[in-house]
Image: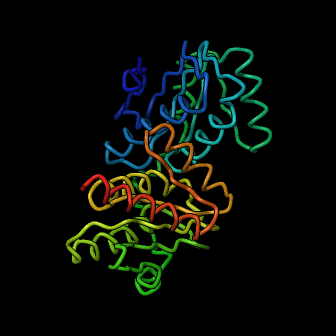
Amino acid sequence: MTPDFDARITFHDDLQTMEADFSNFDFPSPALVNAFYDRIESRIRETGEDKWFFLVNYSHCRIDSSAWVAFSRRGKALNMAHSMGSVRFDVSDATRKQIERDAKTERFDPNLFADRDSALARIKTFDSVRRKKIVHTPSHTPEEIARRITFDPDVPLMEADFSNFTFMHSRDVDDVYDHIEGRIKASDRKWFFLVNMENCEIHPGAWVRYAHRGKRLNIAASLGSVRFAPGSETEVEIRDRAESQGFRPNIRNTREEALERIAEMKAELIASMS
């Protein structure tokens, strides 16, 4: 049975606070960690507000050792992208020690409290940044983005070259995907997607938007997608999200291997239509 994540995610608009209830919850695997954080990210996006204070209930939460790396990575990414300040309360001894170790390693204030009232009191001392309108400056010119997107109608193949490319924030994601969607719409057809992820960096503030726009584009216009990257943190992140969101990441080490996979997918598509 799939856990009811939504029942554990609450938004207190008057406090500008998102409360995540991990109490009496088991994280036995990275897959469940990623699924829970995927839902938190989606709920934040649905609010229309990019920044929130985070209040996290760890009472009797159990995180398996195999899930700690994913839990730490996704928590850090979520905080960097959307938190104006995070407070945790009522953690068990085991979880407390792990969070404190992570805090020392990652150099952040764990803000641990014994009860919810104390945690809320701490949040009320934080300054909100919502009143400061955030306007992201584009990191890439339209000309650079256009050069990185090519089409081969004979396959048909759309190739996105994100090598040595950085998505700093949601504006960068929208600029790229607006360009791709515009050109695909003008072509009036679907395409196989080949994506070069070598040395691509997707910063925490861009991940939610990147996942949303990528999924939307694939549903609307892809005959099949293959990515290639010879090992990177971005590859690990894509594989984790693919597992929790139920899609095949189709990541290969080289462009040649990725093209071979696309040829296989094309053959499978033709066979299914015959």
> For this view, does 238 lie left or right of residue 273?
right
The residue furthest front is: 274
In the rendered image, the quadrant that contains the N terminus is top left
Depth check, front residue: 231 or 155:
155
Q: Quadrant of residue 247?
A: top left
Query: Residue 64, how many percent across, how many down?
Result: 67, 22
Depth check, front residue: 242 or 139:
242
Q: Residue at x 61, y 22 (%)?
A: 28
**Relative height, residue 152 to residue 166 (above, below):** below
Depth check, front residue: 170 or 230:
230
> For this view, does 69 lie left or right of residue 22?
right
**Relative height, residue 77 to residue 57 (above, below):** below
> For this view, does 222 lie left or right of residue 189?
right
Q: Quadrant of residue 136?
A: bottom left
Q: Residue at x 63, y 37 (%)?
A: 70
> For this view, does 191 lie left or right of residue 116?
left
**Relative height, residue 118 to residue 77 (above, below):** above
Model colouring: rainbow
Query: Residue 151, how many percent across, how many down?
Result: 37, 79
Depth check, front residue: 164 or 171:
164
**Relative height, residue 44 to residue 172 (above, below):** above
Query: Residue 270, how many percent across, how many down?
Result: 31, 60
Q: Quadrant of residue 218?
A: bottom left
Query: Residue 268, how many percent across, how many down?
Result: 37, 55
Q: Residue at x 35, y 33 (%)?
A: 14
